[in-house]
Image: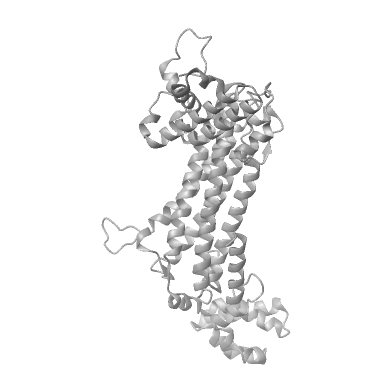
């Protein structure tokens, strides 16, 4: 059944009909469309636009439509234009012509945006919970590795010793912000557009605040024209997804890199790797590579929505039918990625010995040596230059920086020279970074506790 056509004397061109239909993808909004339609029927009854008994029959009939659809996938096999016409058609099979009264004073323009807001609200709740689970997994591994010393990197070059817990906390805090960003966006998603009509509002005496409360919305849209054309909330949600996916991709890159045989800082769980069709020894990090690769996909969904909205005049345009697939695609990609990443993180097996061997390279203690000299009174820039010269000398001699420092420093700073062995101990090096946010084990544990508190764990 079409929801229009009284002034047409023929059916649409078949090819155009298929081109125009959205039921193939907007059927995902079925539960939300039914929820909104049930609330609207109750609102019609409350304001006496229809008799209370009719409102009750509509409400019960809509509940039956959803129950039948959930019980039998074949029930969805209908040549419907969209999810809205599907629901009204199936409702008509249950309550007859009364089904049309459920559309009294209502436009598909407001129906579509209401259902999408409801769906995104649910998606945000699911993603926020999934992000919290990943933070918890990172916190667990970080606490286990709070004293596991490893190299920290800048510019993909070994820089200073850190702990694995410090690395885990860095990724956990990025995800804390992602969760906060999603929940902040939820406030702008959770605004009721229903009751806006096609663009000018409704002539019915609807209690929109009561309708909003019925559907769990926190606010009511203030302008009907804005309400039906607004897709800011969808773009903001997809951006939050893209930022989350970017952080997942960065975590994936670290796990791919540091689990490689060349580093072997930890092993990935077999359940999230695949083998090679040719090389029997391979365990490929395919799960992580896919997470990393999907970041480009979600980024494209952001651009898809922004490009869609650019240049549209005020009012609903059919272009906006294209909003849903970008939203669904982004949400699906991120939900799958968060779930996979949580499994990977939980299954990591740390190799503290490999980490510490890599962290024990003398050059990574150069910055700490320069700071020690400066704290003994040598201006930092001079200390920096001196240590740089010691590094160059060690490289020229094919010696170690610690050996050269032990030989040269007594004449510069006997106090520092006396502590050379401790200054070149990576475990001691991380313990000096004890200020809040640092890599010292106690600071790392405090950071991880704070991350857990930030997600309510």
In depth, the one of 165 and 71 nearer the eye is: 71
Q: Position of residue 421 (x, y in %)?
A: 56, 88
Quarter of the figure that contains the N terminus: top left
Left or right, residue 227 beside residue 292: right
Using the rendered view, name the quadrant where residue 197 is placed. Answer: top right
The residue furthest front is: 53
Examine the rendering and report whether any part of residue 252 can be seen: yes
In depth, the one of 58 and 109 nearer the eye is: 58
In depth, the one of 5 and 431 nearer the eye is: 5
Quarter of the figure that contains the C terminus: bottom right
Q: Is residue 405 above or below residue 200?
A: below
Q: Is residue 296 above or below residue 418?
A: above
Which residue sits at x=52%, y=31%? Answer: 322
Examine the rendering and report whether any part of residue 242 can be seen: no
Q: Position of residue 405 (x, y in %)?
A: 58, 86
* Colour pattern: one colour
Which residue sits at x=49%, y=63%? Answer: 137
In depth, the one of 254 and 194 nearer the eye is: 194
Q: Position of residue 119 (x, y in %)?
A: 54, 39
Q: Position of residue 176 (x, y in %)?
A: 59, 58
| Numbered marks: total | 0
Which residue sits at x=50%, y=84%? Answer: 399
């Amino acid at each position: 059944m079409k929801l229009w056509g009284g002034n047409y004397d023929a059916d649409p061109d078949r090819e155009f009909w298929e081109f125009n239909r959205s039921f193939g993808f907007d059927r995902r909004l079925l539960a939300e469309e039914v929820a909104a339609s049930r609330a609207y029927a109750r609102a019609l009854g409350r304001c006496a636009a229809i008799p209370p008994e009719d409102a009750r029959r509509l409400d019960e009939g809509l509940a039956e439509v959803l129950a039948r659809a959930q019980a039998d996938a074949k029930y969805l096999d209908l040549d419907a234009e969209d999810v809205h016409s599907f629901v009204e058609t199936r409702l008509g099979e249950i309550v007859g012509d009364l089904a049309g009264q459920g559309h009294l004073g209502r436009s598909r323009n407001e129906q579509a945006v209401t259902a999408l807001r409801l769906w995104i609200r649910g998606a945000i709740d699911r993603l926020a919970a999934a992000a919290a689970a990943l933070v918890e997994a990172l916190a667990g591994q970080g606490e286990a590795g709070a004293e596991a010393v490893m190299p920290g990197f800048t510019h993909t070059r070994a820089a200073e010793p850190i702990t694995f817990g410090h690395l885990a906390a860095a990724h956990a805090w990025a995800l804390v912000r992602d969760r906060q960003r999603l929940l902040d966006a939820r406030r702008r998603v959770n605004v009721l557009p229903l009751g806006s009509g096609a663009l000018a509002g409704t002539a019915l005496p609807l209690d929109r605040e009561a309708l909003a409360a019925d559907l769990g919305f926190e606010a009511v849209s203030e302008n009907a024209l804005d309400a039906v054309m607004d897709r800011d909330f969808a773009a903001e949600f997809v951006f939050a997804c893209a930022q989350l996916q970017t952080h997942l991709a960065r975590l994936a890159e670290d796990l791919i890199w540091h689990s490689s045989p060349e580093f072997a800082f930890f092993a990935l769980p077999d359940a999230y790797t695949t083998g090679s069709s040719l090389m029997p020894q391979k365990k490929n990090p395919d799960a992580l590579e896919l997470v990393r690769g999907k970041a480009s996909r979600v980024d494209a969904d952001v651009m898809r929505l922004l490009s869609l909205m650019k240049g549209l005049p005020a009012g609903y345009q059919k272009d906006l039918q294209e909003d849903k697939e970008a939203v669904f695609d982004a949400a699906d990609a991120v939900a799958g990625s968060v779930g996979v990443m949580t499994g990977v993180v939980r299954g990591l097996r740390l190799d503290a010995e490999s980490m510490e061997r890599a962290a024990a390279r003398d050059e990574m203690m150069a910055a700490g040596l320069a700071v020690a000299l400066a704290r003994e009174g040598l201006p930092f820039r001079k200390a920096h230059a001196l240590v740089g010269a010691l590094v160059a000398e060690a490289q020229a001699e094919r010696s170690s920086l610690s050996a050269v420092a032990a030989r040269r420093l007594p004449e510069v700073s006997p106090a520092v020279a006396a502590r050379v062995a401790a200054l070149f101990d990576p475990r001691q090096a991380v313990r000096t970074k004890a200020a809040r946010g640092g890599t010292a084990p106690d600071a790392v544990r405090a950071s991880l506790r704070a991350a857990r508190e930030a997600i309510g764990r």
